């Protein structure tokens, strides 16, 4: 049986079409993403602007075509921060169902964290060693402390990269005073996270897809690490390399970032905030063992769907 899972995020809409076997394992048929920047221009005021709304609908039109092409009968769509917080989010949900027959389930940050954890567990072997899982979204950032079997703590913070950009206008390049202001804000917001890290003592940091895959790709190009350019679901990053990439990103202009190898166009503007987020978390927790998971929310949602329905 084929299933479609849609992860409708603040920056990117994702479509995963999977073939599910009788033993509940699955294989990828199609994995597609469209940059929609749903939060652009309005996330700070909890509104989806007209242009962002249109981009989102066009992405759903494209996904609808693929769903029909592959004759998918079961479609599961999940809307995250931008859709659940926007005043006109319900209008978007209603239009998606009317135009394309796609029913969007608006999930809260805790459900996001659960999906992310189950996605990461399929890509990274956590075993009995506790890990701090981090997912940087546009509207929120999710953290989970877990091992392969148990979740010890989870939380969603309204500190996504797009939201930070809206609340903290940046110079080009980011100035030292601007960066310190953002870092101070995040250090205060993440106090519950730091308490949890001290309590549960995770041994490593796992970055879930998105910006972390961009860090991995940039490191591969910058330091000729071909092992990080393959299709492995789990990638170990050298912390010295991570720090060098961080320094380059926070001191770069937009035009300079456009020319950086491994940095895809859709992340040119958000990657600076993502870098600051990672820096604050690492500096305050002391975690420098960084692993990147290629799986995140949509793969975790698929896992839960398969197990719940017992295909």
Image (tube, rainbow, N blue to C red):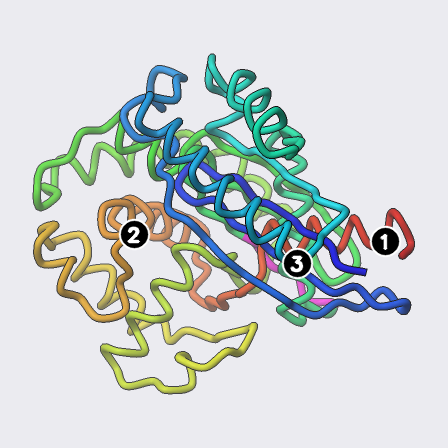
**Disc 2: which residue:** 267
**Disc 1: which residue:** 307
The number of numbered discs placed on residues in the rendered structure image is 3
Tell me if mark 3 has few (under 14), some (14-19) or many (20+) residues whose alpha carbon lies within 10 angstroms of its own.
some
Alpha carbons under labels 1 and 2: distance apart: 33 Å
Foreground residue, 171 or 196?
171
| Residue 11, picture quadrant | top left
Quadrant where the C terminus lies? bottom right
At x 67% / y 72%, what residue is drawn? 125
Question: Who comes first in sequence, dot 2 or dot 3?
Answer: 3
- Give percent across and percent down for residue 49: 33, 21
* Position above or below: 43 against 243: above
At x 50% / y 68%, what residue is drawn? 291
Alpha carbons under labels 2 and 3: distance apart: 30 Å
**Disc 3: which residue:** 70
Callouts 2 and 3 close, C-beta under 8 Å: no
Quadrant where the N terminus lies? bottom right
Question: Who comes first in sequence, dot 3 or dot 1?
Answer: 3
- Give percent across and percent down for residue 252: 11, 55
Residue 169 falls left or right of residue 194: left
Per the image, label 2 sits on a secondary structure element best described as helix
At x 64% / y 41%, what residue is drawn? 154
Based on the picture, tell me whether residue 26 belongs to the magenta stretch: no
Residue 47 falls left or right of residue 182: right
Tell me if mark 2 has few (under 14), some (14-19) or many (20+) residues whose alpha carbon lies within 10 angstroms of its own.
some
- Give percent across and percent down for residue 287: 46, 60
Range drawn in magenta: 128-133
Foreground residue, 1 or 256?
1
| Residue 57, picture quadrant | top left
């Amino acid at each position: 049986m084929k299933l479609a899972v849609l992860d409708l995020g603040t920056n990117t809409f994702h479509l995963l079409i999977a073939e599910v076997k009788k033993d509940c394992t699955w294989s990828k048929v199609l994995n597609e993403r469209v940059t929609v920047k749903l939060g652009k221009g309005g996330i700070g005021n909890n509104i989806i602007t007209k242009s962002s709304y249109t981009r989102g609908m066009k992405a759903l039109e494209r996904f609808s075509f693929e769903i029909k092409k592959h004759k998918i009968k079961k479609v599961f769509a999940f809307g995250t921060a931008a859709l659940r917080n926007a005043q006109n989010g319900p209008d978007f949900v209603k239009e998606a169902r009317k135009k394309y027959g796609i029913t969007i389930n608006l999930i809260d940050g805790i459900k996001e964290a659960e999906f992310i954890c189950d996605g990461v567990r399929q890509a990274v072997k956590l075993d009995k060693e506790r890990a701090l899982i981090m997912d940087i979204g546009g509207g929120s950032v999710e953290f989970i402390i877990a091992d392969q079997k148990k979740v010890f703590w989870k939380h969603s913070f309204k500190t996504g990269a797009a939201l930070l950009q809206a609340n903290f206008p940046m110079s080009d390049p980011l100035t030292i005073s601007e960066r310190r202001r953002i870092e101070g804000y995040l250090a205060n917001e993440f106090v519950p996270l730091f308490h949890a890290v001290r309590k549960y003592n995770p041994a490593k940091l796992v970055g879930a897809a998105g910006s972390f895959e961009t860090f991995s790709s940039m490191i591969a190009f910058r330091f000729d690490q071909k092992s990080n350019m393959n299709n492995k679901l789990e990638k170990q990053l050298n912390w010295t390399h991570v720090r060098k990439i961080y320094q380059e990103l926070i001191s770069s202009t937009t035009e300079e970032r456009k020319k950086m190898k491994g940095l895809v166009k859709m992340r040119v503007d958000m990657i600076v905030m993502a870098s600051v987020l990672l820096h604050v978390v690492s500096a305050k927790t002391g975690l420098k063992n960084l692993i990147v998971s290629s799986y995140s929310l949509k793969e975790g949602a698929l896992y839960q769907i398969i197990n719940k329905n017992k295909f």
